[in-house]
Amino acid sequence: MQAQNLDRTFAALADPTRRAILARLAAGEATVAELSRPFSISAPAISRHLRVLEAADLIAQTRDGQFRRCKLNFEGLESAAQWLEFHRRFWSDSLDHLEDRLKAVGRLAR
């Protein structure tokens, strides 16, 4: 995943309102009006949040008459998940090696 795309993804995920929108979309697609109901923010603010999520490739929006429908884009989330998994494995392996080394050194010091 390109660094710029990854930056957009994690910046989008940093906001609690955007995470709540993604959580709602995990249950299925919704119109912009349906997504905005639980929030006490303006319609333009919701639209800005949706643009950020779309720019990060986390959602897709389509027109349905006079409504805009939003759905989760699993590929955008999958790319971020792969990046996180790579780094989780790297640090886990590194810490396991460090633990083994410290145990070996500790045995020599005794």
Image (cartoon, rainbow, N blue to C red):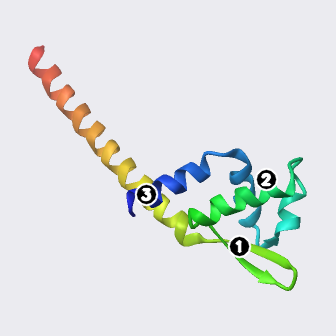
What kind of element bears circle 3? helix
Q: How many other residues sit within 10 Å of disc 2, few (<14), some (14-19) or many (≥20)?
A: few
Res 54 seen here: yes
Quadrant of the rendered image containing residue 85: bottom left
Name the residue located 70 percent from the left edge and 53 percent from the top edge: 18
Q: Amino acid at mark 2?
A: Ala
Name the residue located 22 percent from the left edge and 39 percent from the top edge: 97
Q: Position of residue 105 (x, y in %)?
A: 13, 23
What kind of element bears circle 1? strand
In the image, residue 27 above or below residue 41: below
- Judging by the rendered image, the residue that carries numbered circle 2 is 45
Q: Check contact, mark 2 vs mark 1: CB within 8 A.
A: no
Q: Earlier in the sequence, mark 1 or mark 3?
A: 3
- Judging by the rendered image, the residue that carries numbered circle 1 is 71
What kind of element bears circle 2? helix
Q: Earlier in the sequence, mark 2 or mark 3?
A: 3
Q: Nearer the viewer, mark 2 or mark 1?
A: 2
Q: Quadrant of the C terminus?
A: top left
Q: Amino acid at mark 3?
A: Gln
